[in-house]
Every structure is written in C-alpha cells, then in structure tokens.
Amino acid sequence: MSLHPLSTLFFSFVTRILGISAFYHDSAAALVKDGIIIAAAQEERFNRKKHYAGFPYSAISYCLEKDNISLKDIDYVVFYEKPFLTFERLLETYLSFAPRGLISFVKSMPLWIKHKLFQKEIIRKSLVSISENKQIPEILFSEHHLSHASSAFYPSPFSKALILTLDGVGEWATTSVALGNESKIEIKKEIFFPHSIGLLYSSFTYFLGLKVNSGEYKLMGLAPYGEPKYADIILEHLIDLKEDGSYRLNMGYFDYCTGLKMTNKKFEKLFGIPPRKPEELLTEKHMDIAASIQLVTEKVLLTMTDVLAKEFPEYKNLCLAGGVALNCVANGKILKQGNFNNIWIQPASGDAGGAVGSALAAYHLALGKQRQVQENDGMQGGYLGQEYSQVEIESELDATGAKFTVMEEAELLQKTTEALIQGKAVGWFQGRAEFGPRALGNRSILGDPTNKTMQKDLNLKVKFRESFRPFAPAVLEEDVSEWFDMDVASPYMLLVCEVAKKRQVTMKEEDKKLFGIDKLNVARSAIPSVTHVDYSARVQTVSKTTNPKFHALISVFKEKTGCGVLVNTSFNVRGEPIVNSPGDAFRCFMGTGIETLVIGNCFLEKEKQEISLIEDYKHKFELD
C-alpha cells in the first residue's frame, strides 16, 4: 500500500521541528534539530498526572529551553496523527454496527465536535498562548503509524530495515509493515481497525481487572504465574491467525467498537467467569488466562516476523514500535527466533514516541533531508528529558527542608554501594530524565539483586503495588552474557531472556507444586530479586558510553560483591509518574520505604530527615 505523505509541498530548508503527541494518552513533545533529537519529554513528568492526555505545554517549554530558543525559532510543528481520518473511522464504525453503540456514539460526539475534530485550531490556539509574538510556525500532520514507523527507523543504527508497527489503533491502521531505506520509509502492508492485536491484548487487560493503556505491563508480568490452558480457545474463537501472519478478530466477542467496555457477555461465557474487579483477589484461572493471551500474542508476532523475513530477505534488520512493541517477552522471542541479524525497538514505543517520530518524518520525508545514521542510535540512551545542575539540586533540596551531604563522586559511589549491600532501597537521581515508560538509571530505585526479599519489599513497601510484579536487572554491558542468555546490547529494557543456566537454582519438587504468588518466595537464581518465576529477566545493559555514572556505580558494587547487576525499577509509586525534579524525588523518598536517596552529588539518609516531612504517599495517587 502507498505511503500517505505528510505534505505535498516542497520546503527548501528546515532547521528545527517540534513534534507533538496529545489528546489521547501520554502526551509529549520532542525537538529535532537538523535531524538530531535534542529533547523529548512527556507532559506527565511535569504536571504529575500519569498518562496525561492534554496539550503538552510544559514539555514544549522544556524542549525550547533545552535549545535556548523560543517558539519563533521553530520552523514547523508536526502533530503525530490526522484527526479527520480518526473521526472518519469513528463514524464508519458506528454506521457499520448501528443501532448497537448508540449510547457510546451520543456520549462521544460532543467531545469530538468540541475538542477533537478541530484539533488544528486547538493546537494553533495553544501554541499562540505560549508564543512571545503570537506568531506560530506552520502546523503539519503526520499519520499515526507513519509517526511510529519513523520513531523506530530514523533513530535506529540501521541504514536499511524492515519496520513493524503494532498498537491498538491509529487513524485506521492497527498493524503496519514498512521498509526503511536511508532517508525513505515506504509502508507496504496494513491491517485495519477493528482487527487489532493491541486491542485484543487490551481486552484481556480489561477482563482481568487491569487498566487499559497501563495495565498491559501487569498482564505480561502475571502471565508466567499461570499455564496457557486457554490459548487454543482464543485461537479458535477470538482470533483467526492466517499462515501469512495476517489476522482477523471475531467481533462478536468484543464491545470496543460500539460500547463503553472492551468485552461482552459472550466473551465472559467463553471463559466461564465475569470480568475481574480491580483489586479483587487474583485466582489461578486469571493467571492461566493471562498466560494464554501472552502465548497467543507471541504466536502472532512470531508468525508475522517469520513470514516477513522470508518475504523481504534482503532486510536483515528489524525495527519495532507501537504499544505492542513494549511487550518485551515477545521481543525476546523474536530475537531468539533468529530471523533478523539485529533488532532495534523504540524505547518510547507508545503514543509519546509519536512526537519524536512525527518530527523526524517531517524532516526526512516531507522536507527531503538526508539522514545521518548514528553509531549506537539516535535516542542517546533515552536520556532526553530534563536535567538539573548541582547548584539547582542543592537549592531545591534546601527549599524542601532536606538534610543532605555533598560528596565527591568516588565517595558517593562507595556510600551508595554500602547502602545497597546493607539491603536498603536507594533512590538514584542523575542527569537527564528518561523519555518513555522505563527508568534507565537516571530516575531509578535500586536494590541488591542477590537479596531474596528485595522484590517483595520493593513492591509492597516502596512501590505500593502488587507483589507479583517483576523487577529488571541493570547489568554492565560487558557482563551481560555472564548473567543472562543474551549476547547483544539491551539498553532500553525491552528484551526478556533467561538467566544464564550457571546462575540458575534448580527448584525442589515440592516448590514446583506451588501455585500462583506462592512461587514468588522460591529463589530461582543467584540474583533472585530480578529473576521471574519462569527464570526470565527483563534486561537492561548499561554502557560506559551512554551512562558513565550508573556504569561506575554498578562497577563499584561488582568490586564489593562480585555481582555486576543491580535491581532497577522506576523512581515512583504505583499511579505516580516517574519523578522529574529533585523535589519530586525527595517527596517520594519521604513518603515511601526508600532508605537512601542520591541526587546528583547529594547523599540523603532517611533517619536524618525531619519527621515532620514524612508524607502519606500510599494514598496520594490514583491506582493504575
């Protein structure tokens, strides 16, 4: 199928492009200068509202400040999708299913007519409100899947790659295949709404009592506790997977086209239970259903990539984006399948990454600018967010009433390592914030992976979340094959593999009979706090080049313990966006079980803080 161009006009010169994603979930802004990503951030990091969908005023301001410019210096603003095509899909869907969905139609139309249909005017007015001279750049519109494909290919280290985009839905497309060559992207195949592997997975997220668009991570983490007993039922009744990797859903079981729910009574009858209520006890059946949809999703992706590798044999590299590309278990199996020499996954694969993709698409496709392939990749380790100087850190901590000690880096690393060895949870705040859903060592909570209770303690006492959720290991890039069945870099925590056999602990027969969450208490390796119940781990490799300070900390920990691995989880609690400022970090520190906080070169200990500064953080944020 042909590529839908951003613009039919030819532009002679472009220096700076501002990309925006907004109005659905995870709004964000990104600044691209001469094809290089200068800055990118999600609005939620600034306003502290998780998955915020409104206009990204603060994220835009940050991007401009990072390059020391104002809006008048921007040449073009690009929105990551085309609202009129989305509205067309909405209308055609309601007409196709009429009279079903009348209530949903009536409820959605006022919102669309007032806020979404005329988004260009809303964007224009929003930009005018932050423009010094009330003049704004020309506004362009990309298409949703083109933005995703661009976010995957252009920052990748490949001059040529096959690009696979999978998500819930863009304007019409839910799955797309594109070919990337130098500065060009050509979309070759698409699957259209309502047939969507992303919406299929989200339907099970909803059915198991988790939040759509955020609970998919939990569903993936829950799957290894169950057995895929219902995989055949899903493949027989819900999805028709073709030999060529295409698929169709049986819409008789779903309500997302016309209703206010994802699934219907027929879906419930198929599995013999009603939808689980949020916070309701998870049963063995819930875990088996989770395992089943995870297996089916993997089967779809493996079938698809296998066929595509044979169809386009000259494309040896694979790029992935879209929300489904955050399913790191499936990604690990695609890598292990061996159809591609290299795989690169956009770390902000969800809608936030569309801000980056739309700006890059405008630069290379609409404006015809040549691409410079960067040796590692163009995402700079994902460290594209806000940064604070040591002076700013100390000033903000002083304003909160924090008690801290400023140390030279060598002493700081030694003291932090001592805290980790003592079993303490450490808040680690350094450099530029990460762009995307993962903390990659700059806004992280760290722990000792050899501590058998660290996973449960961090989940319950620090993160205030479900005990079953796994944590990721951050491992020295040069040590990855010593600890994991992996010999490639995984800088963005988007590949799952097994812990190396030599590090695994064989389970006793009585342990193998344990059910569900009880499996959590059985150590499976020398690094039990980052080893999931199926011996897997979501690996982050840490490079001395992209994050020297985090690499240095893990190296000191290795010197002391022989283990070049740390527990790494995002610096936040359940329902809270990842911390962005020193003040955010201190408040989270004082409201949770984190015992040590390191911000820049400032070292803070919980027992030395004023008792009056302790917060009730557990109930501060809405559960996700």
Image (tube, grey):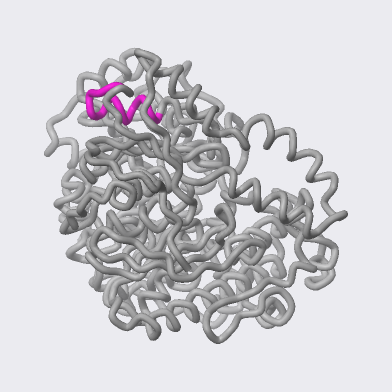
Task: Please state the extent of the stretch shown in magenta in the rendering.
Answer: 59-70
Residue ranking furthest to the front: 9
Residue 142, image x, y percentages: 44, 47
Residue 166, image x, y percentages: 50, 63
Q: Is residue 526 magenta?
A: no
- At horizontal 30% and vertical 76% (from top left) the residue drawn is 315
Residue ranking furthest to the right: 99
Q: Quadrant of residue 603?
A: top left
Q: Is residue 479 left or right of residue 168?
A: left
Residue 401, image x, y percentages: 36, 14
Magenta region, mostly helix, strand or loop? Answer: helix
Q: Quadrant of residue 57?
A: top left
- Would residue 565 be seen by someone viewing this image from the given angle? no
Question: Quick one: quadrant of the C terminus?
Answer: top right
Q: Is residue 50 left or right of residue 430?
A: right
Q: Is residue 248 left or right of residue 522?
A: right
Question: Relative to 313, does residue 584 appear above or below in the rendering?
Answer: above
Q: How many marks?
A: 0
- Would residue 350 be seen by someone viewing this image from the given angle? yes
Between 356 and 331, the one nearer to me in the picture: 356
Question: Relative to 435, does residue 172 appear above or below in the rendering?
Answer: below
Question: Relative to 11, does residue 585 appear above or below in the rendering?
Answer: above
- At horizontal 40% and vertical 50% (from top left) the residue drawn is 348
Between 276 and 347, the one nearer to me in the picture: 347
Residue 242, image x, y percentages: 59, 83
- At horizontal 64% and vertical 66% (from top left) the residue drawn is 195
Q: Quadrant of residue 77?
A: top left
Q: Is residue 61 magenta?
A: yes
Q: Is residue 14 left or right of residue 411?
A: right
- At horizontal 36% and vertical 72% (from top left) the residue drawn is 499
